[in-house]
Image (cartoon, rainbow, N blue to C red):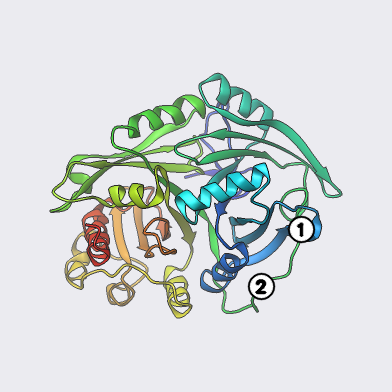
Amino acid sequence: MDVVRKPGRGGLRSAGAPDDDPFPVRGMDAIVFAVGNAKQAAHYYSTAFGMTLVAYRGPENGHRESASYVLESGGARFVLTSVIAPHTPAGRELARHVAVHGDGVLDLAVEVPDARAAYAHATANGARGLAAPRRESDEHGSVVLATVATYGDTRHTLVERSGYSGPYLPGYRAAAPLVPPRAPLTFTGVDHCVGNVELGRMDAWVDFYRGVMGFTNMKEFVGDDIATEYSALMSKVVADGTRKVKFPINEPAAGRKRSQIDEYLEFYGGPGVQHIALTTEDIVRTVRTMRESGVEFLDVPGSYYDTLGDWVGRTRVPVETLRELSILADRDEDGYLLQIFTKPVQDRPTVFFEVIERHGSLGFGKGNFKALFEAIEREQARRGNL
């Protein structure tokens, strides 16, 4: 695919993207987590995911309601926030989010070239505005921010940052890494963010993204596409015209037992972000390093690899290495991909991560769905939730 440079995180825009896009985006700006203890969470993502602390905001620099740590790796940016003053309005909201959902994603922030225009378009087309456009400034310049609601308690902050050169946003100060540098472990960016919604609500949220953000349907998985002997789910993927921002949306489907979506909705307390896929250029090195740091990945039966080469063909990584590390592979008409999934990264069986290395494929590993969801079901059974 031919690409041209465009400012913003991720930096690539499809050459064929429409010039009359009603809701142009520049990529994912940040994944904002509400957590019980941001300092400890920041240390976990620094140690286990190899991310680097770059900015901080808290009582030490005038923000007394909460503490926020900004970590980056390549084009991926996480913001980890926990409450300090639960008696304040903002503190109460943050404390309620953590009490209801546990550690989870509060905000899928999207970078846009014009936050005011994006907010106006979104609210005119049915989005519920949470914060009208506002300008914030410091010695590094200015940003314009606006926020709209999406499924559950999740939100999208629209970030216009072309006039800003600071480490994150006004009010944040640069911060030193929490852990010493180690072997390179760099994610190149956020590939996609998956949301789980209630039964019968998937199409409504697909329509939301089509109408509010001008996104289009990219993929659709229904029926036997994502089904095992025991459970099933349905999924549709919406994306902006450049394919830089992709949001798969899942809902449960009828099955003999509870699906992973049912389990998530119960323990998260409603709809929310299920998993975040991070791109890498070397999945083997990334997975080895993460395993050495204590990250747990889903196990894949050895039988999966016995015939893998027959239908995936040759890949950059030998099948025996894929088998050793439980890395999945899939191929479509555009190329192939390699992917692996962590177990949930908190005590509640909710948020987890995917690591993905793409070689042309624009898919999501459809050929792996059965093996993946059987692996998830084995974990559900161990928890007593299947």
Residue at left offset 48%, top offset 64% = 281
Describe residue 266's horizontal placement relative to residue 346 as left or right. Answer: left
Tell which residue pokes out farthest to the front in this image. Answer: 87
Describe residue 57's horizontal placement relative to residue 140 as left or right. Answer: left
Residue at left offset 28%, top offset 47% = 262
Q: Residue 178: which numbered mark, if any?
A: 2
Sequence order check, earlier mark of 1 and 2: 1
What x and y, as percent, mark residue 135? 77, 35
Q: Secondary structure at mark 2?
A: loop
Looking at the rendered structure, the kind of residue marked 2 is Leu
Residue at left offset 62%, top offset 49% = 9
Describe residue 34's horizontal placement relative to residue 219 as left or right. Answer: right
**Residue 16 vertical placement versus 226 (above, below):** above
Q: CA distance from mark 1 to mark 2?
A: 18 Å
The image quarter in which residue 327 lies? bottom left
**Residue 282 vertical placement versus 188 (above, below):** below
**Residue 320 vertical placement versus 255 (above, below):** below
Instruction: Identify residue for label 1.
Output: 59
Query: Is residue 370 shown to the viewer in this render?
Result: yes
Counting labels gives: 2
What x and y, as percent, mark residue 50? 56, 70
Looking at the rendered structure, the kind of residue marked 1 is Pro
What x and y, as percent, mark residue 182? 60, 79
Tell which residue pokes out farthest to the top in this image. Answer: 124
Residue at left offset 30%, top offset 77% = 324
